[in-house]
Image (cartoon, rainbow, N blue to C red):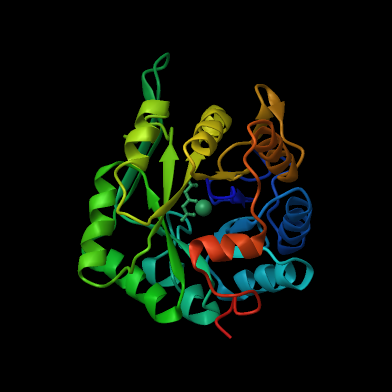
């Protein structure tokens, strides 16, 4: 079985310090927590940027400040998010790709919706739809191709795998492809069970690699199942604010430590950032910005 690539998503675009004061928002905090995560076994950091008020931004200058700071102190692979946030336009969301030519970047390969219903008060607590046309998705994919950036293809429901196959056919995405299975978003089809994860992992084209992302309480059960299936894993405060039931996380390194501990217990060795570059076929260190 391949060594385990541990990816950590430090910040995200959905929640901020109001949800957990230890969630890093500003570049200096994000860089510091990335360094701590590297020390306990992370190979990849998944980066979102925030402006000085803590609101999500797609400003390539902020992404550059964060990734330069991480590259100066670690050998981590840097994955920049094109997911941005609801109010950020598509053009803005992908602006950092030609600007920074990152080794890896997220590609949400379809339209997604998520909703949380308050049964007691009979009202929607959240009701969010991100709609992206095929032409828009092709633009994102070709922008990455031109920059030498490998897409981390985010799969929210099984049908999206067919979108990836279609884009591979039209030459907008090249094999071998790397996928993220996102399990357990309220309202999304990827139901967070071992059976669904097994099904998704068996539905990929030959030679693909994949990681699993569990939302909230689903994070560690899905991470453990993903390790056993030979996949890779992503943890961190972007998708889970609690290190254990009812225990708020103090930082992102706790998630990486817990993941590395589970991996050791089941005998799955952990990949270094350079081993992750080998496994995923990424640019070598120092070419993170397409130098
Ligand atoms: N928060 C994850 C479920 C992105 O940043 O482009 C999805 C994600 C997508 O991380
Ligand atoms: Zn993200």
Which quadrant would residue 19 be assigned to in this image?
top right
Horizontal relation, residue 280 to residue 77: left or right:
left
Residue 51 visible to an observer of this rendering: no
* Left or right for 220, reference 88: right
Q: Position of residue 243 (x, y in %)?
A: 68, 31
Residue 180 lies left or right of residue 62; in this view the side is left
Q: In terms of depth relative to the viewer, which is nearer, 258 or 247?
A: 258
Return the x and y of residue 154 as percentages of the image width and height: 40, 52
One can see residue 98 in this view: yes
Total marks shown come to 0
Please provide percent x and percent y for residue 218.
52, 29
In this picture, is 20 found above or below 280? above
Residue 98 at x, y percent in the picture: 47, 80
Q: Residue at x 32, y 41 (%)?
A: 202
Given residues 112 and 121, the one toward you in this image is: 112
- Above/below status of 94 relative to 11: below
* Vertical arrangement, residue 185 with respect to residue 96, above or below: above
- The answer to which image quadrant residue 107 occupies is bottom left
When asked about the image quadrant of residue 70, the answer is bottom right
Which quarter of the rendered picture does the C terminus lie within?
A: bottom right
In front: 41, or 1? 1
Q: Residue at x 52, y 45 (%)?
A: 1
């Amino acid at each position: 079985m391949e060594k385990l690539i541990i990816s950590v998503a430090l910040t995200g675009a959905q929640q901020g310090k109001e949800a957990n004061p230890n969630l890093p928002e500003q570049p200096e905090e994000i860089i510091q927590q990335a360094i701590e995560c590297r020390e306990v076994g992370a190979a990849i950091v998944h980066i979102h940027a925030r402006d000085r008020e803590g609101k999500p931004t797609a400003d390539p200058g902020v992404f550059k400040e964060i990734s330069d700071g991480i590259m100066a102190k670690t050998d981590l692979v840097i994955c920049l998010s094109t997911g941005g946030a609801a109010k950020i336009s598509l053009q803005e969301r992908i602006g950092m790709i030609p600007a920074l030519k990152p080794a890896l970047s997220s590609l949400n390969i379809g339209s997604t919706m998520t909703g949380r219903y308050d049964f007691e008060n009979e009202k929607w607590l959240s009701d969010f739809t991100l709609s992206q046309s095929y032409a828009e998705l092709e633009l994102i994919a070709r922008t990455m191709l031109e920059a030498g950036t490998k897409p981390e293809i985010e799969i929210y429901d099984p049908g999206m795998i067919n979108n990836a196959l279609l884009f591979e056919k039209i030459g907008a995405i090249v094999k071998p492809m790397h996928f993220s299975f996102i399990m357990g978003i309220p309202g999304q089809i990827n139901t967070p069970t071992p059976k669904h994860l097994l099904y998704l992992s068996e539905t990929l084209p030959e030679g693909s690699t994949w990681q699993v992302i569990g939302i909230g309480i689903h994070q560690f059960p899905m991470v453990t199942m993903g390790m056993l299936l030979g996949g890779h894993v992503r943890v961190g405060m972007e998708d889970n604010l609690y290190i254990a039931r009812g225990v708020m996380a103090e930082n992102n390194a706790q998630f990486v430590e817990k993941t590395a501990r589970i991996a050791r217990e089941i005998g799955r060795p952990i990949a270094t950032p350079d081993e992750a570059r080998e496994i995923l076929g990424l640019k070598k260190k120092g070419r993170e910005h397409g130098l």
